[in-house]
Amino acid sequence: MTKYFPVLLLILFIGCLASAVWFAPTLSVSAGAEAPPTVSALNNNADSIEAPCSSNHPEWRQAQVIDGVSIAESPICDADNPYAVALAVKGSNNVSMATLMQTDIAQDALILGEDLDQDGDPDVINIKLEVVELNGSSPDGSFLMNTFAIAPGLQPGLWVFTPKSRGMAIKGYNSTEAAPMLRAPSPTIRVEQGDKVVITLENTHYLPHTIHLHGVDHPWLNSEGHDNDGVEEHPVLPGEQHRYEIQPRHAGTMLYHCHVQTAQHLMMG
């Protein structure tokens, strides 16, 4: 057994590495309303030198109410944009224009419709997603654009789903860092059992993509009679869009991913 130990160790290392680069976005289906997640402060190594907080928006960390949505104080340095949080709760069609303009999210990115079961939550949900490249090359120089570090000093090339956006893909004119909504893993989609959900992929990328709702029960065809499974045979070409429709019957946490040229797209996140 001793002579095989280095081989087994190599296999374990490769397995850990493979799991480390798999950034699968998730789709979480709940049985009903649930408490919002809490954020725990990170424990810092006392012997290490902590970089100063580089957030351009320290005010985002404060507890506040935006368009009737109560947002708790955030202990992290670079907090989520509270205006985007309010939009995610109410939908881009139900927030004020002032709130919408404080985000990089498009006006039709998240449309919340009817409350069919009269429980206070919308049951018709329309989401629009795009595909964005992170840490890619730039024609303007030998540097990465839309930079996103998955750990200090680690900036692998990634393709990610993102809410339909507007404006710049970077934080500012003097920055190469990706805008807050462009991140890995891609956004978690949270819905309830029985919700009618339409996810439209608007492919603004230079390669074909799909959305495959892995583990979510859904029909093979959407209401228009077109592909609803997002597999290899039905790519969404650059400049095209496609609708995927679900009405989940089971609670749980599933994932969604691209299913075109899967070997390459999987390694790109």
Image (cartoon, rainbow, N blue to C red):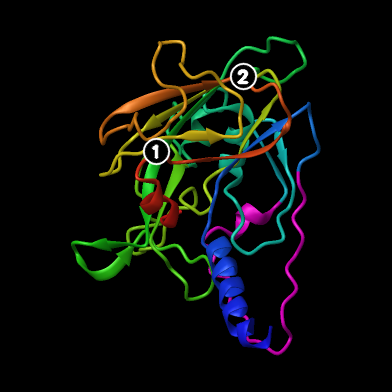
Q: Along the horizontal axis of the image, is 117 left or right of 176? A: right
Q: Is residue 168 above or below residue 20?
A: above
Identified at 61% across, 72% down, the residue is: 12
- Position in image of residue 234 (x %, y %): 34, 29
- Position in image of residue 38 (x %, y %): 77, 51
Identified at 36% across, 53% down, the residue is: 264
Amino acid type of disc 2? Gln
Q: For marks 2 and 1, give the CA distance.
A: 22 Å
Q: Along the horizontal axis of the image, is 207 left or right of 127? A: left
Q: Residues within 10 Å of mark 1 (few under 14, many from 20)?
A: some
Identified at 57% across, 48% down, the residue is: 81
Q: Which residue is mark 1?
A: 130
Residue range (magenta) = 37-62
Quadrant housing residue 192: top right
22 or 27: nearer the eye?
22
Residue 223, numbered label: none
Q: Residues within 10 Å of mark 2 (few under 14, many from 20)?
A: some
226 or 14: nearer the eye?
14
Q: Along the horizontal axis of the image, is 105 left or right of 116? A: left
* SS of the residue under disc 2: loop
Residue 247, numbered label: 2
Q: Is residue 207 above or below residue 222?
A: below
